[in-house]
Image (cartoon, grey):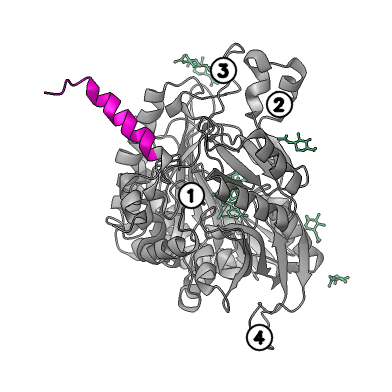
Amino acid sequence: MVKPFFLPILLSAGAAAASQTSHCRCRPDEPCWPSQEEWLSLNKTIQGNLVAVRPVASVCHGDEYNPQACKAVIGLWSNSAWRSAQPGAVQWENWEAWPENHQTCYIDSPRGTKCGQGRVSLYSAKVQTVFQVQQAVKFANTHKLRLAIKNTGHDFLGRSTAPESLQILTRGMTDIQIVDDFVPRGAPKGKSEGHAMTIAAGVQLPELYTAAAKQNRTVVGGSSHTVGAAGGYIQGGGHSPFGAWGGLGSDNALEFEVVTADGTLVYANAYQNSDLFWALRGGGGGTFGVVTSVTVRTFPEVPVLVYNLNITAVQGTPQFWEAWSEFHAALPSLNDAGGSGYYFTVPNFPLNTNTSVSVFISLLMFPGKTDPAEIDKLYQPLKLKLQQLQGIQVQNISFPFPTMNSTIFTLLLSGENADSTGSILMLGSRLFSKDLLSSKDGADRLTDAWKSIKMDPYDQILGHVVAGGAVAANGEKIDSAVNPAWRKTVTHMVYSRNWEANATLAQQSAIIKNMTEIEIPILRSVEGEDRMGAYLNEANAYEDGFQQSFWGEHYPRLYSIKQKWDPAGLFISRKGVGSEDWDDAGLCMTTGGRSKALGH
Ligand SMILES: Cc1cc2nc3c(=O)[nH]c(=O)nc-3n(C[C@H](O)[C@H](O)[C@H](O)COP(=O)(O)OP(=O)(O)OC[C@H]3O[C@@H](n4cnc5c(N)ncnc54)[C@H](O)[C@@H]3O)c2cc1C
Ligand SMILES: *[C@@H]1O[C@H](CO)[C@@H](O)[C@H](O)[C@H]1NC(C)=O
Ligand SMILES: *[C@@H]1O[C@H](CO)[C@@H](O)[C@H](O)[C@H]1NC(C)=O
Ligand SMILES: *[C@@H]1O[C@H](CO)[C@@H](O)[C@H](O)[C@H]1NC(C)=O
Ligand SMILES: *[C@@H]1O[C@H](CO)[C@@H](O)[C@H](O)[C@H]1NC(C)=O
Ligand SMILES: *[C@@H]1O[C@H](CO)[C@@H](O)[C@H](O)[C@H]1NC(C)=O
Ligand SMILES: *[C@@H]1O[C@H](CO)[C@@H](O)[C@H](O)[C@H]1NC(C)=O
Ligand SMILES: *[C@@H]1O[C@H](CO)[C@@H](O)[C@H](O)[C@H]1NC(C)=O
Ligand SMILES: *[C@@H]1O[C@H](CO)[C@@H](O)[C@H](O)[C@H]1NC(C)=O
């Protein structure tokens, strides 16, 4: 009889043997890890743009403590533009840490705490050219390294970083080309897509808007100071406050320039590599290759009328939630009339020590509209319903803007010049359908679900009216990987959770577990299990059945395109296509993945 204590030894010997086969990425303590000379030669081939990386907060801790550098880092801590340029940072502190492996480097930890590398990459190729991207990809391929692509690091699911990895940092690629008459490569002569812009991988949304506005044109993009225009945003689908007017960001992508897993440069559009083109429009970032540039359609400028409706009540007033339900019941018709934008709900907003209020603020934009009376008429049925509810205050105002550019810069991006960042954050979200909110008790069921999600003081529910209109219509015209649920969506709703840097792993796990196993299922159940889904870029990082939630019926096709273009899994991103074949860190294939790789 084998004594039980031999068992772990046998198992760990087995694990070591497995890691010597091709089922794991090469790790720093293994003989396969590149030598100093090899790193040096990579550095030479990429013109000296390789850097060894430590987490940005390391200068505030242990032996690395440096008072001046630390002071500077503290000052820049919540500056999203700075974070996007740092190899040793992403935007959300929790994705810099690897608490499961006892490696953290929180800025708030005591000075004496030694900093662990966490999920921060070990080396970064701060690429400036396509050639440098190719060299970094080939190097990672040759040495079987874990590769991470970081653009701005905004990803909420931890996709832009990976433990023990080589990072490709794209922020240095900022070229923007105006194309008056874009003809995709390989298209028949005369097949012009009209005015377009070709933007390099590191261009951020406001840079794209500014360049378009200089041409008296506009583009469909998101609402952020520092989110990338060509990276995770557009590859994940990309929603816009003008979605009902212009579609999803990815609906307007005309061509991608991509470095694939073997280091070759290919173009993907409707005429060549069309399977890759299909996958890159909604299949998710970091999965099919490194996109070095993307060409996007532009639109002529139009004026915008913005309509702001607020509802407030003393916290605990039941009519507040009735009003909330009425707003949701009215959403399909407001959206059908061209309205899109955002709404914010803070169920418990403390005004002072004695009073809290419930606050609802909506900002819907109507592109091409200039007459406030026309919009008032649209809101009239909702306003009549709200007038019948006691105990709530309803206010409205409208703002005309001459252009989308002015709407974006003076309204959506006004105030600060960076995004809020540098903290610990987890999201939970769901897409809800027009069918649901048009049905008899749909809005009430949605309201009941949200009422049962615990909302502490200042906690917020964010609604995105970024679909309908052109997004829905494009479902008939455009065949792309985007979650088919987007075409039926009327609102994308998000809430968040966080914890203190000193929270134990058990405390963190409890929050994640409650979101994943209690709260999200409450939101899911409103539409019936898996009838809609969630937006992959703004979702629970531990989403159960992510393949179905993020891509619905498109998943099998995405999985096979992934196997074709990246059979060895060089590009693995958390909760991305094919990631189920790997462990959470993307370092080793799991048993299921191994048997698939071996053709079992
Ligand atoms: C303040 C804020 C506002 C937002 N607003 C919107 C919005 O209006 N609409 C919307 O749809 N989303 C919005 N988002 C979500 C946003 O789309 C995601 O955070 C997205 O992941 C950001 O992409 P990125 O390239 O900037 O970031 P990163 O975190 O650097 O990258 C995200 C993913 O894309 C991959 N990737 C990046 N660049 C490339 C590349 N060149 N080639 C291949 N893979 C690449 C990364 O590996 C990673 O997997 C917002 C997020 C924030 C924080
Ligand atoms: C790469 O080369 C540059 C320029 O010579 C140097 O500054 C940098 O430290 C090198 N990177 C590494 C990782 O050695
Ligand atoms: C944009 O419009 C302005 C005002 O009509 C005009 O002066 C300018 O030349 C236009 N710019 C371009 C690039 O068309
Ligand atoms: C809150 O209530 C207490 C006790 O009634 C009162 O003394 C105090 O002035 C109130 N504070 C405010 C800000 O209203
Ligand atoms: C709605 O609330 C916001 C935030 O408090 C405020 O800035 C805005 O003026 C309000 N709108 C109306 C119409 O009162
Ligand atoms: C908003 O509400 C006020 C007061 O009820 C009304 O007079 C006004 O016309 C409304 N509409 C707009 C577009 O501001
Ligand atoms: C875009 O709008 C902003 C804010 O109104 C303005 O400052 C900027 O000049 C505009 N850009 C162009 C190119 O029109
Ligand atoms: C789990 O979530 C529900 C709904 O938000 C909440 O009421 C409950 O308190 C949470 N439980 C824990 C342990 O956090
Ligand atoms: C964590 O830090 C906060 C202050 O930021 C403190 O209130 C709390 O007690 C600490 N918790 C633990 C578990 O140490």
Name the residue type under label 1: Ile
Residue 27: image location, x then y, percent: 51, 35
Q: Which of disc 4 and disc 1 is earlier in sequence? A: 4
Q: How dense is the environment of label 4, judged by Cα within 10 Å: few (below 14), some, or many (20 and up)?
A: few
Indicate left or right for 254 with 507 as reference: right
Name the residue type under label 2: Val
Q: Residue at x 62, y 35 (%)?
A: 35
Residue 319: image location, x then y, percent: 38, 45
Q: Which residue is mark 4?
A: 191
Asked if the residues shown at circle 4 and circle 3 are in contact, with their CB atoms under 8 angstroms apart, the answer is no
- Residue 15 on the magenta span: yes
Quadrant of the snapshot with the N terminus: top left
Distance (Cα) linking label 3 and label 2:
14 Å
Distance (Cα) linking label 1 and label 4:
35 Å
Asked if the residues shown at circle 4 and circle 2 are in contact, with their CB atoms under 8 angstroms apart, the answer is no
Distance (Cα) linking label 2 and label 1:
30 Å
Distance (Cα) linking label 4 and label 3:
58 Å
Name the residue type under label 3: Ser
Residue 419: image location, x then y, percent: 65, 41
Question: Secondary structure beneath disc 4?
Answer: loop
Q: Nearer the viewer, residue 259 or 556?
A: 259
Q: Which residue is mark 1?
A: 572
Q: Which residue is mark 2?
A: 73
Q: Residue at x 73, y 64 (%)?
A: 403
Q: Residue at x 61, y 52 (%)?
A: 138
Q: Nearer the viewer, residue 554 or 320?
A: 554
Task: Please report the bounds of the magenta region as a residue range.
Answer: 1-18
Asked if the residues shown at circle 3 and circle 1 are in contact, with their CB atoms under 8 angstroms apart, the answer is no
Q: Nearer the viewer, residue 328 or 180?
A: 180
- Residue 356 on the magenta span: no
Q: On screen, 569 above or below 276? A: above
Question: Secondary structure beneath disc 1?
Answer: loop
